[in-house]
C-alpha cells in the first residue's frame, strides 16, 4: 500500500505541476512560476534516479575471491538482490516481489552449499566458523520471512537492507579469508 501511495502522490504532483504550468502561462510567457515547474519536472527523473541508485548494489572487482564459480555466484546474488530491490521500489505487484525474494533465498542456500562443499573438500581450517555464519544468516532470513508473511509492507525494506548489507560484508570480509587458501590448492 505504501508504494501505491507514493506512486499516487508522485502522479498527483505531476498533474498539479502541469496545471500550475498551464495557469501560469495564462499570466504571460515571462511569468517565472511555470518555468520553475518545468525545470522541476525535467529534474524529477534525475533526482529519482540519484535517490534510488543508492539502493542497488553493483559488482566491484574488489569483491572477487579469485575463484570463477564463486565470483559468478556472488554476481548472481547481487543481481537477485537488485531484482528484489526493484520489486520493493516500484509497484510491480506482490507476486513479483515474492518471486524475487524466493529466488534470492533459494540461490543463497544453493551458493552456501557449493561454497561449503568447496571448503570442506579442500580441508579449509576455518570451515566450521564460516558455515556457522551461513547458518546464522539463514536463521535470520527465516525470521524475516516469518515476519514478512505477517506484515509484508513493514518487513520488506528491512529484509532487503539486511540481505544487501550482509552479503556485501560477507563477500568483502569472511569470503576473502578462504580465497587465498583455496587458490593455493589450485582452485580458480
Image (spheres, rainbow, N blue to C red):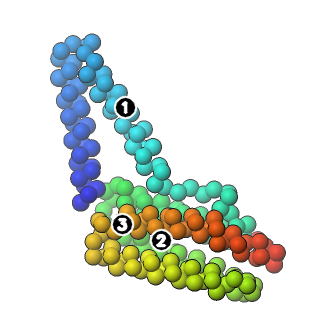
Choose mark 3 or mark 1, whichever is in front.
3
Q: What residue is shown at x 69% (from left), y 87% (from top)?
A: 120
Q: Residues within 10 Å of mark 3 (few under 14, many from 20)?
A: many
Q: CA distance from mark 3 to mark 1?
A: 31 Å
Residue 90 in the image: above or below residue 22: below
Kindly indicate the quadrant of the structure image that contains residue 127: bottom right
Image coordinates for residue 137, horizontal then vertical, percent: 50, 77
Task: Indicate the quadrant where residue 140 lies.
Answer: bottom left
List the residue tagged with mark 1.
42
Assign the C terminus to one quadrant of the image. bottom right
Q: Which of the marked residues, 3 or 2, is nearer the chain's N terminus?
A: 2
Category of crowding for the residue at label 1, using alpha-carbon neighbours closer than 10 angstroms: few (below 14), some (14–19), many (at least 20): few
**Place of residue 141 in the rendered image (x, y in percent of width and height, measured from the top left):** 44, 76
Which badge, 3 or 1, comes first in the chain's sequence?
1
- Check residue 187 in the rendering and tell me which mark sits there, or answer none: none
Pick the residue in front: 136 or 22: 136
- Picture coordinates of residue 164, whole percent (x, y): 50, 64
Residue at 39% in and 65% down: 158
The correct choice, above or below, for 35 with respect to 152 in the image is above
Q: Secondary structure at mark 3?
A: helix
Q: Nearer the viewer, mark 3 or mark 2?
A: 3
Residue shown at the point (21%, 36%) measured from the top left: 15
Distance (Cα) linking label 3 and label 2: 13 Å
Q: Is residue 80 visible?
A: no
| Tag 3 residue | 156
Quarter holding residue 65: bottom right
Q: Which residue is mark 2?
A: 104
Q: Is residue 145 left or right of residue 19?
A: right
For the residue pair 99 and 14, the one nearer the viewer reads as: 14
Q: Please state, as top left, top right, bottom left or bottom right, where the N terminus lies in the image.
A: bottom left
The answer to whether one can see residue 8 in this image is yes
**Label whose residue precedes the other's in the sequence (2 or 1):** 1
Amino acid at each position: 500500500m505504501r508504494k501505491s501511495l507514493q506512486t499516487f502522490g508522485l502522479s498527483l504532483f505531476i498533474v498539479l505541476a502541469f496545471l500550475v504550468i498551464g495557469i501560469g502561462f495564462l499570466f504571460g510567457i515571462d511569468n517565472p512560476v511555470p518555468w520553475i515547474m518545468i525545470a522541476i519536472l525535467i529534474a524529477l527523473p534525475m533526482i529519482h534516479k540519484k535517490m534510488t541508485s543508492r539502493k542497488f548494489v553493483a559488482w566491484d572487482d574488489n569483491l572477487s575471491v579469485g575463484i570463477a564459480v564463486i565470483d559468478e555466484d556472488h554476481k548472481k546474488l547481487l543481481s537477485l538482490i537488485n531484482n528484489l530491490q526493484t520489486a520493493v521500489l516500484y509497484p510491480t505487484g506482490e507476486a513479483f516481489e515474492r518471486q524475487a525474494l524466493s529466488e534470492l533465498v533459494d540461490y543463497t542456500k544453493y551458493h552456501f552449499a557449493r561454497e561449503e562443499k568447496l571448503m570442506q573438500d579442500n580441508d579449509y581450517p576455518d570451515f566450521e566458523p564460516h558455515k556457522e555464519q551461513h547458518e546464522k544468516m539463514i536463521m535470520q532470513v527465516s525470521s524475516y520471512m516469518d515476519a514478512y508473511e505477517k506484515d509484508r509492507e513493514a518487513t520488506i525494506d528491512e529484509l532487503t537492507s539486511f540481505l544487501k548489507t550482509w552479503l556485501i560484508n560477507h563477500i568483502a570480509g569472511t569470503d576473502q579469508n578462504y580465497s587465498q587458501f583455496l587458490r593455493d590448492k589450485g582452485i580458480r
